[in-house]
Amino acid sequence: MACRRWLARLRQPSLGRGIALALAALGAALKVAGFPAPDAPRASNWQLAAALTACWSMYETARCLGRAWSLRHAGVLVLLYAELMILALALFLWVYP
């Protein structure tokens, strides 16, 4: 029960929720694009759902930024850059193949 609390409290910022959403967006984008089979990449409109999930994860992570500079602030920025790359990958897989 305790591990579900951070998922249910949407009004409180949560790094765990942002990371979980980003990993779900990455997995969905790769699965929809047909990643394990390199001979048949395909574009799908479902990639837009993965891109929107990546945007939501970036919003959740950005809510965790503090006002003052600290190591936590730097870590959150690194996570934001990683989520930006996931968003770019989802959009690339939606447009390119």
Image (cartoon, grey):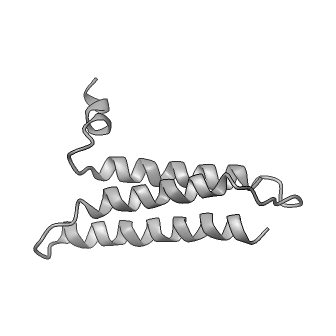
Residue 50 percent location from the top left of the image = 57, 54
Q: Residue furthest bottom?
A: 69
Vertical placement of 91 versus 61: above or below? Answer: below
Q: In which quadrant will I find the C terminus?
A: bottom right
Vertical placement of 24 versus 66: above or below? Answer: above
Which residue sits at x=30%, y=32%?
A: 3
Q: Quadrant of residue 1?
A: top left
Residue 10 percent location from the top left of the image = 27, 42
Residue 63 percent location from the top left of the image = 25, 60
Front position in the image: 21 or 69: 21
Which residue sits at x=52%, y=48%?
A: 24
Q: Is residue 91 left or right of residue 23?
A: right
Q: Is residue 47 left or right of residue 5?
A: right
Front position in the image: 52 or 14: 52
Vertical placement of 75 versus 2: above or below? Answer: below
Q: Residue furthest left?
A: 68
Q: Is residue 15 left or right of residue 57?
A: left
Numbered circles on residues, count:
0
Which residue sits at x=15%, y=72%?
A: 70
Q: Residue furthest top?
A: 1
Which residue sits at x=22%, y=45%?
A: 11
